[in-house]
Image (cartoon, rainbow, N blue to C red):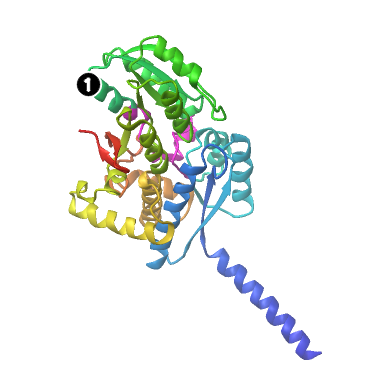
Amino acid sequence: MKLGKSIVLAAMLSVGMAANASAEDIVVGSSLGLTGYGSITDGHWRDGMTIAIEAINEKGGVLGKKLKLVYEDNKSTPQQAVVVYRKMMSEDKAVVFDSGCISAGNFAAASFVTKAKLPMFLCSILPRLPDEQKWAFSFLPPPKFEVETRYEYLKKIGITKIGILGDPSPYGTIMRNIALAEAKAAGMDVVANESYQQEDSDFSVQIGRINASGGGAIIMIGQGNAVITTANNIKQLGLNKMLLLSSINERDLVLAAGKILGDQFMFPAPLIQVAQDDPSVITNPTTKAAVEDFFKRMKAKFGDIDPAQSSRAFDSIMMMAKAMEMAKSTDGEAVREAVEKIGHYDGVGASYDFSATQHVGVTKNPYAMAHVVNGKIAFKK
């Protein structure tokens, strides 16, 4: 009987110790679109966070504690994002969020996350309201950089008549408005302005209208498998002179689109995306060492996945940890203020310049036009 009681007591102590150990973790919550149209992008964001946290924990963690990533699938919808954000706040006790690229989902949760005074590190654009923006930090380069890169290239090769083909997401809407607003100054004539839904399986009608209006190139706005649908439709319609300039996109998708359309397909690419196939494009010695370590870790754990999103996710966690160390605290207010004071930071995916008045970290255009050559990504010359 006494032995039985000892076993029960030991078991109870064991459970208590496990709970206490778990309570000592610094919980980073993440709302991710792991199903739905954001699944590829947000899956890579998760992977980048994962290896960053592993690298930090290998060196002892932050403030003597381990970082713990808790993520939930928002199914690429704002409604589910609200559910998972609330769950991670109430059940998992997240002290900070580092969430994926579903802007609408992050917007939907921003009000109550802000009221809780929890910082939000985001793959997406910032929420709309100033009070919400105060607590959010975007690691996504501004949409205008994608537009400018594509317009500069088209102007250089002498194509001025273009069609826009985009989805209605918050990010897509912002980019469409920028593309329309800056077209005239860039010497572009938008002859057609077309839309699609992520679940659509054919864009032939929209592409046909762009072609009939004299468009020589399509400025595509939106990520995911829609770029493959567009490339296939251009091929099927026999439009062998129509150029497709997609948004930034994942490696597997751009390689597939490039295989379909050859030199008719191109896209804005960050340096690290090209460096995966051509390491020589990284010339800064300090950055080069960090990039090499990043690729080594990514390949060991996940294989040759696209680095464009995962590298900025990696940077976001590294900057989060730096802010906590600077603040000597995980308190939301202290961490938020520390991020604003980090100053210039050269990451593996981009360089960042956050401040009290600048919560979009990428302030210089990181893109150059790229295409697919023999199954590899290369800068367009």
Tell me if residue 277 can be seen: yes
Q: Residue 132 magenta-drawn? A: yes
Residue beneath label 1, please? 157
Query: Local crowd at mark 1 within 10 Å, few (<14), some, or many (≥20)?
Result: few
For the N terminus, the quadrant is bottom right
Locate residue 372, reporting x and y percent.
31, 38
Judging depth in this view, the residue of 164 and 77 nearest the camera is 164
Tell me: residue 283, above or below residue 62: above
Amino acid under disc 1: Ile
Residue occupying image coordinates x 55% and y 28%: 201
Segment tinted magenta in the rendering: 119-146
Tell me: residue 7, above or below residue 320: below
For the C terminus, the quadrant is top left
Tell me: residue 368, above or below residue 166: below
Locate residue 72, reporting x and y percent.
58, 49
The residue positioned farthest toward the right in the image shown = 1
Q: Residue 107 magenta-drawn? A: no
The residue positioned farthest toward the bottom in the image shown = 2
Number of numbered discs present? 1
Residue occupying image coordinates x 37% and y 21%: 218
